Image (cartoon, rainbow, N blue to C red):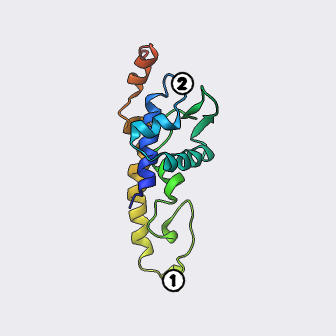
């Protein structure tokens, strides 16, 4: 199950997508207020996202937070992994943090592992294909219009 922390992280990230085109810094207080996210909880999330390389942070009166990359290149799975860890239901099905289950007598003969890998692949397939920009409802053309330039010919 997706944790409240991951939901808050996605909510904050979507708010930052709204400011990605203009490059403005957004304060944690503003994110907390607009996203209805508890301030102390949000601060910890922002540190995780910054340490994960998805945010830039700057102190001071004109500081705040902004995305460190184009929101079309950041997947929903990226954000969830930073906050909640692997997408897999069991450690033996994880591609990013594989380990044998502590209660499993033999990894090779485990009857659940194959099913847990399929479940992980299905969830990861959906979440990895969904970018923050798409989740926030912003297509490439909307962001270009926000910057004042029309999309070029194809």
The percent coordinates of residue 29 (x first, y second) are: 49, 37
On residue 2, the disc is: none
Tell me where residue 12 sits by quadrant: top left
Q: Is residue 154 visible?
A: no
> Which tag is nearer the camera, tag 1 or tag 2?
2
Camera-side residue of 20 and 108: 20
Q: Quadrant of the N terminus?
A: bottom left
The alpha-carbon separation of the residues under discs 1 and 2 comes to 49 Å
Camera-side residue of 45 and 94: 45
The percent coordinates of residue 36 (x first, y second) are: 39, 42
| Label 1 CA crowd tier, 10 Å (few <14, some 14–19, many 20+) | few
Q: Is residue 64 above or below residue 40?
A: above
| Label 2 CA crowd tier, 10 Å (few <14, some 14–19, many 20+) | some
Tag count: 2
Question: Along the polypeptide, which appears first: circle 1 or circle 2?
Answer: 2
Q: Is residue 46 visible?
A: yes
Q: Quadrant of the C terminus?
A: top left
**Who's the residue at 55% across and 28% down the image?**
25
Secondary structure state at the residue bearing disc 1: loop
Horizontal relation, residue 11 to residue 25: left or right: left
- The residue that label 2 is drawn on is 23
The percent coordinates of residue 4 (x first, y second) are: 41, 55
Secondary structure state at the residue bearing disc 2: loop
Q: Is residue 104 above or below residue 70?
A: below
Camera-side residue of 72 and 30: 30
**Who's the residue at 42% across and 59% down the image?**
121
- The residue that label 1 is drawn on is 103
Q: Is residue 76 above or below residue 18?
A: below
């Amino acid at each position: 199950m997706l944790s409240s922390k991951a939901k808050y992280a996605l909510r904050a990230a979507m708010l930052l997508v709204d400011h990605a085109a203009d490059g403005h810094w957004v304060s944690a207080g503003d994110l907390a207020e607009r996203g209805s996210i508890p301030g102390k909880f949000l601060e910890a999330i922002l540190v995780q996202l910054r340490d994960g390389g998805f945010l830039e942070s700057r102190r001071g009166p004109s500081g705040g937070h902004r995305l460190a990359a184009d929101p079309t290149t950041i997947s929903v799975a990226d954000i969830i992994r930073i906050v909640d860890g692997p997408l897999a239901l069991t450690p033996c099905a994880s591609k990013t943090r594989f380990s044998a289950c502590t209660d499993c007598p033999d990894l090779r003969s485990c009857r659940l592992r194959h099913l847990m890998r399929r479940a992980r692949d299905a969830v990861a397939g959906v979440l990895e294909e969904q970018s923050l920009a798409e989740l926030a409802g912003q297509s490439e053309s909307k962001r270009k219009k926000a910057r004042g330039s029309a999309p070029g010919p194809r």
